[in-house]
Image (spheres, rainbow, N blue to C red):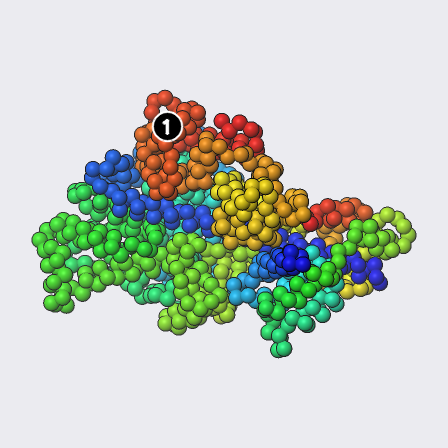
Amino acid sequence: MRAALLIQRWYRQYVARLEMRRRCTWNIFQSIEYAGEQDQIKLYNFFGYLMDHFTPASSERNLISHIFRENNICRNVDWERYFCYKSIEVPKLYSGPHLSFPITCSNAAELVEAFKNKQQLHSRYVLQLLGETWRLLRILPNISQISTCHSKEITICGDLHGHLEDLLLVFYKNGLPSSEKPYVFNGDFVDRGKDSLEILLILFSFLLVYPNDVHLNRGNHEDHIVNLRYGFTKEVLGKYRLHGKKILKLLQKIFSWLPLATVIDNKVLVLHGGISDTTDLHLISRRKRQNRSGMTDSDLEDDDPTAKPVDSSRRRVHSLTHSSSTGTRHEVQRRSLQGLNNRVTCSVEEELKERRRQAGLSQSYGDLRNSLANSDSDPDSGELLESYGDEWKQIVDMLWSDPMPQDGCVPNEVRGGGCYWGPDVTEEVLRRHNLTLLIRSHECKQEGYEFCHNRRVLTIFSASNYYEVGSNRGAYIRMGPDLVPHFIQYQANRATRALTLRQSVGRTERSALRALREKLFAHKSDLISSFQEYDPENTGLISLGHWACAMEAVLRLGLPWRVLRTQLVGDTLDGMLDYHLWFRELSITEPNTEVSLLETMYKHHSNLETIFRIIDTDNSGLISFEEFRQTWKLLSSHLQTEISDEAISDLAVSIDFNKDGSIDINEFMEAFRLVGGDLLQNEGDPH
Amino acid sequence: MAEDKESAEAIVSEVHKKIRAAFDVFDHEFNKTVDVREIGTIIRSLGCFPNEGELHDVIAEIEEEEPTGYIRFEKFLPTMTKVLMERKFRPIPEDLMLQAFEVLDKQKKGHLELEELTKYMTQEGEPFTQEEMEEMLSAAMDPDKNLIFYKDFVSMMTVDDPR
């Protein structure tokens, strides 16, 4: 019947439009997310820039050495003392779970229950649990091996990102970990979600109870610098005001000791990010067991080198950028891969010198090198230097890379670390290691999982509603001896399941557009100048085509602007847009000098906050005004923006800092957010 | 006149860019191809209202001689440009939509029963799949009464549509 036909036609059109909107919304979130990660890498580059420009005479010297100041404690024995929980008393009023060690499976189950009921574990138990975990991790291999013998099915979970409700849902559907129910957790347990610490505590407790059946792989977010930016540091300090700093420090160590990958039945490789054309698993797994001649075990143990500072800033510089330990598993700090090699050779040389000095050897580096050239007595040390850089790159690749549809292997410019690898690389690496499947995570997928590269690569993502309520489902894998993956999908929030397609797209879209508007605000002056280029006669009007070009040129998010236009632009006169009017309608004020300082700061507020937290090495929440001023000057010179001292001082005054010369970071960022928020809502007066 | 020609070219160029933008959203491999199953979504998102039969005709025109499951942009662009320039598959005005529902509502109740609508949508015209039917019901149906108040439904959908 014609009527039925008409209705069907109409409705299908509608659904198609929704689908388009959903895709675009997804693109928005993803591009902003990756732009954020890129920013993070740029931050590392900033520190590289600092190091390059550091001279003893420069006035920023104090700031820089402060940033890179070394802690005094450096041997494991001393660390153990520092992390000791024994002096912490648990008050009688404490109603949370009590843990006893060695931890039992009922303890672990109790912990899950407690967190489900929103209880918090006492810091004494936290430190105790983390301490035990650290001790265990130090004896685990870099690459775990598991087998599905005894018809055991293995469960594999992807990114959780602090979404406790998803982990609880998985346990509910699949059962708690046990010897009958082995689990692999594939990294990115923390950041973004609000219960990252609880997830870690649960995973670690099961790890301690079932060390052969629970396997954790490190993700790129298991890194204390990334945590400064993406919320985990804040979460811990907020939940544990007294002992948060210690907990964070211990976690820093734990992260650096997490295994990097898991292999199932020698056939299936599970790791967080991916691979590159140079991936060599043998290299990675061998690393730990190598023995350096003339170096004692205690030297091999941890990440901080010597007791006696030679040139404190230089030494710490080296450990910020990459691990200072040689021969053991590293703390991975991501940096731009350019310029890495110089730094590696200099700092490794320094490191070796110090260690040799400690060990009482008098050989210089040059001598050592020569002696290597002449004899094969110690192939390891020479190999160390060359492979040091390689190994580091491999680890970064394993944690940060993404698959791409085209053949080849290119640097991952979007994330700023790792690479993009193609199907040919997959085939080659799998063949080289005699593997059949690569399971990885790292990228959010709408259905919770996705195959690519001829079903040789499988992405699994376990945080549902990652970008926004209703944005995606989470999933986990069950795999038996046949090594065929079976998927179970879910979505944590009950309410989202009841949402219609339209409602969930609408909601996610509103969220994405809000995030996008923030970006527009942050780039307002650039956008206006770009529009003006297309409007030489200053009519205030530009065509929609030009609008789209300008948006991409300034924001560089790779978004389909023409498609998004309907969501972002209201009425047009004959296809011409009044851009000043448009900005006003978006509730963005006219730029003036005061606002442009704020705008610049707002654009970089994430970086600013991260830098602040790095400067605040004792995590007290306070930095001095002078440090703040110097930081801002450094950052602005790196970004090549011109900000006068006076402007900074005025800004400081208007945001009303304590007059005692110290800045409460939280207060500053909060006030800053409020001021930024006001501007977004067009309250008129920027201050 | 020269000016007219220029503005005509400008219009076509703009149309091309629009088509390109919509196409790119679904070009997952960045190689100027999309899965043929997404063509319907792309065409519709550009503002066209083809029915399934018309869609198949368009696809037949742009498919490769030996169907690969993928549509290349070079083939898609000219066909789609023609569709847009000739204003094929025009949108359905709201009042016409209302009339269509009223035709189905034989007893003129002002609403449709769940079974009524389901029967029409899944058995007549170009039938809905079960998934499509469920989705429409979740959007259109009053869950307490299992009735579809189509007047509200039509206005809600029309308002919703950003044009």
Q: Nearer the viewer, residue B86 or B63?
A: B86
Q: Residue at x 14, y 61 (%)?
A: A369
Q: Residue at x 50, y 70 (%)?
A: A454
Helix, strand or loop at mark 1: helix
Residue A573 appears in the figure: yes
**Callout 1: few (<14), some (14-19), or many (20+) C-alpha neighbours within 10 Å?**
few
Q: Left of A275 or right of it: where is B142?
A: right
Residue A82 appears in the figure: no
> Where is residue A25 shown, x and y percent of the image?
58, 50
B21 over A426 or under it: above or below: above
Q: Residue at x 36, y 35 (%)?
A: A632
Q: Residue at x 56, y 28 (%)?
A: A684
Q: Left of B77 or right of it: where is B48?
A: right
Q: Look at label 1 and name its amino acid.
A: Glu
A134 over A291 or under it: above or below: above
Q: Left of A83 or right of it: where is B63?
A: right
Q: Nearer the viewer, residue A364 or A677?
A: A677
Pick out the residue farthest to the top.
Answer: A659
Q: Residue A267 sits in which quadrant?
A: bottom left
Q: Left of A57 or right of it: where is A615?
A: right
Pick out the residue farthest to the bottom.
Answer: B66
A55 over A27 or under it: above or below: above
A680 over A172 or under it: above or below: above
Q: Quadrant of the N terminus of chain B?
A: bottom right
Identify the subunit bearing mark 1: A
Q: Residue A11 sits in which quadrant?
A: bottom right
> Where is residue A364 shown, x and y percent of the image?
11, 55
The residue labelled by disc 1 is A646
> Where is residue A675 shown, x and y percent of the image?
49, 31
Pick out the residue farthest to the right.
Answer: B107
